[in-house]
Amino acid sequence: MDATSLEFWARILVSLVCGGIIGLERQIRGKPAGIRTSILICLGTQVFVSQGTSLAGGDHYRVLAQVVTGVGFLGAGLMISQEGMVRGVTSAAVIWMLAAIGATIGLGRQKEALVLVLVTVGVLSGVEYLENSIRRLRSGVHARHQSFEKQGHKRGRKL
């Protein structure tokens, strides 16, 4: 890693952009691991992987494995159990993706990292849109009709 090289700064810039885009999506939705955290996870992972791959005779696989372990610990810290429900699983999964994107950048694959950002934001936004659509369908006319039928059957009447 040479701070005077264009590659060094390109990796930093792509890490900032990738972490920032995902972090912005999380920040807008009021979720944990917003912009700063997302940028730092992406950037930090990129730095570790870049350093690990630049070491002569170093074990690149071991560097990746240790990053995965550390990120898993960080993600586990976000998950909590409240009243029998586990919360924060999606935020923990986002941290996994941020680290994967940072590792991809650290391996010199910036274009692939940008594609992974688009896929990640697409999944986060697209699935939320789908979930909201299903909720609206359940609370619409069909839900009221099913509720009415159940009440009629409970009273022994046939509709």
Image (spheres, helix red, strand yellow):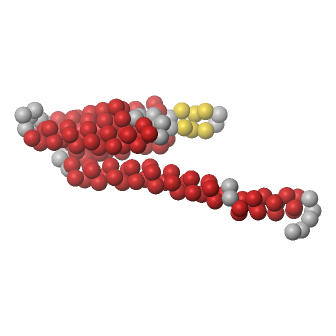
- Looking at the image, which residue is at 26% across and 38% down? 16
Vertical position of residue 147 compared to residue 27: above or below: below
Q: Quadrant of residue 50?
A: top left
- Looking at the image, which residue is at 87% across and 69% down? 159
Q: Quadrant of residue 49?
A: top left
**Most distant residue in the left direction:** 4
Q: Is residue 94 visible?
A: no
Q: Would you say 103 lies left or right of 120 here?
A: left
Q: Which of the two residues, 155 or 106, is positioned nearer the viewer here?
A: 155
Numbered disc total: 0
Vertical position of residue 77 compared to residue 122: above or below: above
Q: Which of the two residues, 6 or 94, is positioned nearer the viewer here?
A: 6
Q: Is residue 80 visible?
A: yes
Residue 21 coordinates in the image, percent (x, y):
33, 43
Vertical position of residue 31 compared to residue 139: above or below: above
Residue 68 coordinates in the image, percent (x, y):
33, 39
**Most distant residue in the right direction:** 156
Q: Quadrant of the N terminus?
A: top left
Q: Which of the two residues, 102 or 61, is positioned nearer the viewer here?
A: 102
Residue 102 coordinates in the image, percent (x, y):
27, 42
- Looking at the image, which residue is at 14% across and 38% down? 9
